[in-house]
Structure formats: C-alpha cells, structure tokens
Amino acid sequence: GNSVTQMEGPVTLSEEAFLTINCTYTATGYPSLFWYVQYPGEGLQLLLKATKADDKGSNKGFEATYRKETTSFHLEKGSVQVSDSAVYFCALTPLADYGGSQGNLIFGKGTKLSVKP
Amino acid sequence: GAVVSQHPSRVICKSGTSVKIECRSLDFQATTMFWYRQFPKQSLMLMATSNEGSKATYEQGVEKDKFLINHASLTLSTLTVTSAHPEDSSFYICSARDVTQGDGPGAFFGQGTRLTVV
C-alpha cells in the first residue's frame, strides 16, 4: 500500500544551522510528493512539491528532490531561522486506477523542528 | 493561492451533544473535499472523501453514522460529530481540491478545528 515514513523528532537546531528532514515513501507508480508545514496554532500550508522523478521543489529556502531510485523526498535548508520552527509533514497523493491523483493525501507522522536563537 | 475557510476554529461541547464543522472553498469550486483527523503528536488520517451531490466515502474504521458529512454545494462541506464523546476530542482538518488545477499542487487546507468534548 501507500505510506510515508519520516524521521522522528523533535529536531532542535541553532539558527543558521543546516537542516535535513528525511522522508521515504512506498507507493505504486509515480505519485506526487509534498512537504507541508504547520506553524504553531495554524493549519497546514503547502511548502513545496514535486510531481515527477528528479524534480526539485523549492520554496522559502527549502528544497526537496524527488528520488525515485531511493523512494525519498528529503527536505533541506541551508540556514534555518527561528521563524522556521514548526511541524513539517511529508505527504504523497496516491494514484487512482486511471493513473491520475485520487486527490487525497497520505501523510507522514510529522517532524517538529525547533530553532534556537 | 486558493483559500479554504474552516469554522469554527475551536469548539468545546458537552458529551452527548452534536457539533457541526464547516469547510468552505472561498475562491474556487471544489467538487471534492477531504476530512482529516489529527491526534496529538500524530499524523493526519483521512476520515472521508466528500463529493458534491453524492454520499461521502468513508475510510475503513470511521463510523459514518457518527461523523455525518454533507457536501451540498461546490463550495461547502460540513462534518457533524453526533453524540460526541471525550474520545472524539481531536483536531479536524478539511481540505478542498481545485480540479481546475488538475493533479497539480495538492489540496488546499482549512485552518482546522480543535474539538474538545467534556
């Protein structure tokens, strides 16, 4: 079946440190992959996405590359800031029988990031 | 980007009462909306898929008689938690799919509703 596994947190970093949050997935075909962010007290926001192998999604200094060979979509940022403190969710859209997206999302458990000044 | 509004953001109710949560797509039509539940320190789990004008499709293990979903228009879906119990306390999140964007950016999410049953 479809599933997403991401590294457990919490992750605590100092400001300007390098961030990696690992995400691997299990799915048939080529699902679209996403990273969502949930800031304290807020709903989910799409951070970045990639829809096919070798695509790189990027936004706000964050990047993730769709690696089909390793079924991974690791999130990276070269220099984190205090304002990046949030919970990050890796997710995929399972494919329907016709090959397109079913529209819903399957999430990993989330990784809490705390950035200290 | 597209906006999804969810209301209320927080609700406290007594055990045995019912609570209705609304999910609206503000600037696009959503033929499909999704309802998720998030337990503390856990991921979001899909509860049901709501299709405009038809019955919702529930995930395995979700009680359809307890979690009533209505998707009467292209911009509104409601989730009613009937005869709520303390174990129903959770964070409920809706999302709506903008089909004009095809299989593109993923669904857009509401702000979520924190339900506390006392």
Image (cartoon, coloured by chain):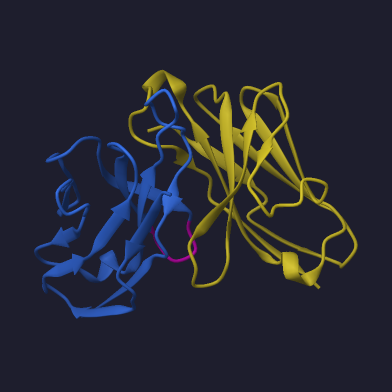
Tell me: residue B106, above or below residue A66.
above
**Residue A107 at x, y = what percent?**
42, 54
The reply to whether the magenta stretch includes residue B91 is: no
The tint of chain A in the picture is blue
Question: What residue range appears in magenta?
Answer: A38-42
Residue name at image x 76 percent, y 51 percent = B63
The tint of chain B in the picture is yellow
For the view shown, which residue lies furthest in the top direction?
A: B100
Foreground of the two, B108 or B42: B42
Looking at the image, residue B48 sits to the left or right of residue A103; the answer is right
Q: Main secondary structure of the magenta part?
A: loop
Task: Please state, as top left, top right, bottom left or bottom right, where the C terminus of chain A lies in the image.
Answer: bottom left
User: For the image shown, how many numbered marks are present on the structure?
Assistant: 0
Tell me: residue B9, above or below residue A14.
above
The reply to whether the magenta stretch includes residue A40 is: yes
**Residue A41 at x, y = what percent?**
49, 64
Looking at the image, residue B66 sits to the left or right of residue B77; the answer is right
Foreground of the two, B52 or A39: B52
Q: In which quarter of the image is residue B6?
A: top right
For the view shown, which residue lies furthest in the right direction?
A: B16
Looking at the image, residue B112 sits to the left or right of residue A45; the answer is right
Tell me: residue B60, above or below residue B55.
below
Residue name at image x 53 percent, y 50 percent = B111
Looking at the image, residue B70 sits to the left or right of residue A112; the answer is right
Q: Quadrant of residue A9?
A: bottom left
Q: In which quarter of the image is residue B51?
A: top right
Foreground of the two, B99 or B14: B99
